[in-house]
Amino acid sequence: MKPSFAIVGCGKVGTALGIFLTSAGYRAAGFTSKSLSSAKRVADIIQSDHFSDVPWEITRNADVVFITTPDGAITDTCNSIARNRGFANNAVVLHCSGALPSTTLSIAKKCGAFIGSMHPLQSFASADYDTNPFQGIIVSLEGEDYAVKMAKEIVTDLGGTSVSILTEAKTLYHASAVVASNYLVTLLDLAFRLIGAAGIAGRDAFDVLKPLIEGTLSNIEKAGIPEALTGPIVRGDVKTVEKHVEEIGLKTPELLPLYKTLGFYTIDIAKARGTISESSTQQLKRITAQKCKVPNLSRASGRTK
Ligand SMILES: NC(=O)c1ccc[n+]([C@@H]2O[C@H](COP(=O)([O-])OP(=O)(O)OC[C@H]3O[C@@H](n4cnc5c(N)ncnc54)[C@H](OP(=O)(O)O)[C@@H]3O)[C@@H](O)[C@H]2O)c1
C-alpha cells in the first residue's frame, strides 16, 4: 500500500501534488492551508472529506507531509506543526523550495520525523491541471536518507526523474536554475533591444532570432561548451567586437556594460576551445573590460512586447 500524504499550503504546487499523488495511488490524509477555502478546493477535486485550517489536525495522520507554502512561510509553518506534535513518528516531511535546504525543517526531527526537500524543475503557473506537470521533469532531492528514499519513489510514481544533490550545494544549485531560466530571459531581452535599435522590433525580432537561439541550444546539446560557441570572439575577430562596442556605446549606451561583460566571459570559453591567439585574447579583454560605472538600465527601446 502506498503511503498517506498531507498537503500544507494548497496553492499551485500543493494542488498538483494532491491531484497527481492521488492518481498514483497515494492516500490523502488531508489538506490544510492558510484559508480553509483553498484546502477545501483541493479536497473537493479529489473527493476527500479531510481538510482543515488547523494544520496539525491533518498532518499527524500522514506518512508524508508536504509543506508547500510560499518559501517565507515554510519554517514558521513547520515550527508550529512541530510545537503541536503534528508530525507522526517516522513521518517524512518535505518542502518543494529550490532555494531553501531541507535543514529549514529541522525542528520536525524532534517529533521523530525525517526531513528532505523535493524541488520540481517545472514552472507551475496556475492551480488548474489538465495534464500531469510532473510527467517527464527532473526533480532534485536532498535531505536525510530515509526522506530522500521516500521522495525518490514518489517522484518515480509521479512520472518524473529524480537527481540527488548535497544539502550544502542547494544554494548554488538554485542559482544555476535561476541563471538558466530567469537570466536567459534577461539575455534575450538584451538581444531584442539591440535588434530593436537596428529597426526590427516586436514579434519580428522574436521570429528573426528564434532559429538562431534554437540552433545554439541544439549545438550545445550535441557538442557541448565550448564547441557550440560561434561568432567573432571565437574567431578572434577583434575589429568586429571593437565596432560592436563603439556602435552600442553611441546608440544604446545603457546596454554596453552587459554586452561587454558577456563578451569578457566569452573570451575564456573561446580560449578553452583553443582557437584564439594570446594577442587576440589580450586585445579582446581590453575592449570588453569595464571602464566606467554601470549606468541605470533604462527601458528605452527594442522591447518585443
Ligand atoms: N510555482 C512554481 O513554479 C514552483 C516551482 C517549483 C517549486 N515551487 C515551490 O513550491 C512551493 C509552493 O509554491 P507555489 O507556487 O505553489 O505557491 P502558491 O501558489 O503561492 O501557494 C502557496 C499556498 O500556501 C498557502 N499558505 C500561505 N501561507 C501559509 C501558511 N502560513 N500556512 C499554510 N498555508 C499557507 C497559500 O494561501 P491560501 O491558503 O490563502 O491559498 C497558498 O495556497 C514553494 O516552496 C515554491 O518555492 C514553486
Image (cartoon, rainbow, N blue to C red):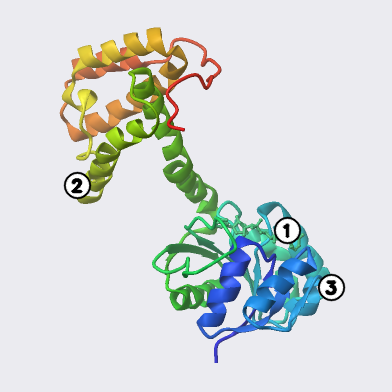
Q: Position of residue 124 (x, y in %)?
A: 54, 58
Report if the CB atoms under discs 1 and 2 are less than 8 Å apart. no
Residue at coordinates 33% horizontally, 10% vertically from top-left? 247
Q: Amino acid at mark 3?
A: Asn
Look at mark 1 in the image and give the residue it sits on. Answer: 75
Q: Secondary structure at mark 3?
A: loop
> Badge 2: how crowded within 10 Å, few (<14), some, or many (20+)?
few
User: Ligand 1: which quarter?
Assistant: bottom right
Residue at coordinates 17% horizontally, 31% vertically from top-left? 274
The extreme front residue here reads 203
Counting residues from the start of the chain, the first of labels 1 and 2 encountered is 1
Q: Position of residue 116 (x, y in %)?
A: 59, 67
Look at mark 2 in the image and give the residue it sits on. Answer: 223
Q: Position of residue 297 (x, y in %)?
A: 52, 20
> Badge 3: how crowded within 10 Å, few (<14), some, or many (20+)?
few
Counting residues from the start of the chain, the first of labels 3 and 1 encountered is 1
Look at mark 3 in the image and give the residue it sits on. Answer: 84
The tag on residue 87 is none
Q: Secondary structure at mark 2?
A: helix
Q: Is residue 100 above or below residue 241?
A: below
Report if the CB atoms under discs 3 and 1 are less than 8 Å apart. no
Taking 104 as reference, is 52 left or right? right
Please identify the quarter of the rendering in which residue 29 is found. Answer: bottom right
